[in-house]
Each structure stands twice: as structure tokens, then as C-alpha cells.
């Protein structure tokens, strides 16, 4: 299956969550068995040569892709969650969003110092959440080998933001515009 075929499986929803936004909905790709399988195999092809210790997924669709990638690689999976969602003792980072602030957390000690990790999410837009997740992982002593995404919205600059911070970044599919 080609990248164009995978791209065609991603639904665009105009004016969501607000007027003027073209929401790129990967759930339609995830619902297509052959498409989802191909997407995971392409993620594996990027991540396997990096030989990570762990795959870290960002809430929420990053859990789906990250867990599938971790299973395919035979690696562990660690979720990075919004504040208050994890039951154990957590470490976290506050970060600025377009209209306010938010917080990401992970269980304390789940990513040991020196761990080599690949950070995964479905889509990179402005990059704030992914950058915060990478910083949180670095604060735990992890080496972030790459931030890996199914979709990039290059006009919003998130990939460049991560790369400017020293995080290698790759996306399989790009959509022009926002």
C-alpha cells in the first residue's frame, strides 16, 4: 500500500474544533485493517534501526500507535498522560498551549535514566505537546532518539520546533495547510 493510499484513508473534517481548522482524523485510517497494518509496518521500519529500549506514546492516539509499534518491536510501552490520569506517583511538566496551559505526566521511575526512547503520536501540528513530552523524558534522564508521527502539518511548524530543540523528528504523511 502506498503513502498516497494511506493518506486517502485519513478523513478531513472542516471547521473542527473551530472555524477555519481542517481536522485530520486518523481514526478512519485506524479503522481500516490493511491500512492500519501498513501504517504500523512503516513506523516499525523507521524505529527498528534506532534500537530503542522503550516506546513512549502521547495521549490519546499516540497510545494506539505507540502500543502497536512497541508490540511489533518487542519493546515496552509507556504512556504520557494528561494530569491526574495515572494512579501511581507521577512526575510531570507544565507547558503552554495556544489558549492556556496543560500538564503531562508519567509514572515515576517508569522511564529509567539512560533509557533510549522513541516518542510517538498520531499527528504533529504546533509541536507544543510533543516538545513538552520530550522535555519530560529528558528530565528523567532518557535519550529521546526520535519523535515519530503518522501525520505532519508542516505549515504549523511543530516538526521544526522539535528539531530546533535537538529532537530528530519524522512523519510518514504530510498535509499542507492547517
Image: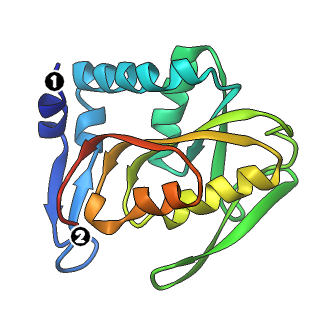
How far from the left and from the top, in percent, is residue 43?
41, 27
Q: Quick one: SS at disc 1?
A: loop
In the figure, is residue 130 to the left or right of 138?
left
Crowding at label 2, few (<14), some or many (≥20) Cα neighbours within 10 Å? few
How many numbered discs sit on the rendered protein? Answer: 2
In this orientation, which residue lies closer to the viewer: 5 or 13?
A: 5
The structure residue drawn at horizontal position 42% and vertical position 59%, both measured from the top left corner, is: 160
Q: Is residue 97 above or below residue 85?
A: below
The scheme the figure's colours follow is rainbow
Residue sitting at x 69%, y 65%? 83
Q: Nearer the viewer, mark 2 or mark 1?
A: 1
The image's mark for residue 2 is 1
The residues bearing labels 2 and 1 have C-alpha atoms spaced at a distance of 27 Å
Left or right, residue 139 beside residue 149: right
In this view, the residue in front, 108 or 113, is 113
Where is mark 2, residue-wise? 16
Dot 2 or dot 1: first in sequence order is: 1
From the image, which quarter does the N terminus lie in? Answer: top left
Is the C terminus in the top left, top right, bottom left or bottom right quadrant?
A: bottom left
Location of residue 97 with respect to 125 vertically, above or below: below
Q: Position of residue 94 (x, y in %)?
A: 69, 72
User: Could you tell whether 137 is left or right of 133 in the image?
Assistant: right
Image x and y of residue 176, in percent: 17, 58
> Is residue 162 something one can see in this rendering?
yes
Q: Quadrant of residue 38?
A: top left
Q: Secondary structure at mark 2?
A: loop
Amino acid at each position: 500500500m502506498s503513502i498516497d493510499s494511506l493518506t486517502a484513508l485519513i478523513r478531513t473534517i472542516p471547521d473542527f474544533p473551530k472555524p477555519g481548522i481542517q481536522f485530520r482524523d486518523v481514526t478512519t485510517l485506524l479503522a481500516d485493517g490493511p491500512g492500519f497494518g501498513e501504517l504500523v509496518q512503516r513506523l516499525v521500519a523507521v524505529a527498528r534501526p534506532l534500537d530503542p529500549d522503550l516506546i513512549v506514546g502521547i495521549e490519546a492516539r499516540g497510545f494506539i500507535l505507540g502500543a502497536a509499534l512497541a508490540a511489533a518491536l518487542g519493546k515496552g510501552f509507556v504512556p504520557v498522560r494528561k494530569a491526574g490520569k495515572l494512579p501511581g506517583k507521577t512526575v510531570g511538566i507544565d507547558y503552554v498551549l495556544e489558549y492556556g496551559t496543560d500538564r503531562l505526566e508519567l509514572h515515576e521511575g517508569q522511564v529509567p535514566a539512560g533509557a533510549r526512547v522513541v516518542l510517538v503520536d498520531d499527528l504533529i501540528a504546533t509541536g507544543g505537546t510533543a516538545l513538552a513530552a520530550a522535555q519530560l523524558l529528558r528530565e528523567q534522564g532518557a535519550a529521546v532518539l526520535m519523535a515519530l508521527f503518522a501525520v505532519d502539518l508542516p505549515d504549523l511548524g511543530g516538526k521544526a520546533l522539535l528539531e530546533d530543540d535537538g529532537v530528530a523528528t519524522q512523519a510518514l504523511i504530510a498535509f499542507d495547510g492547517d
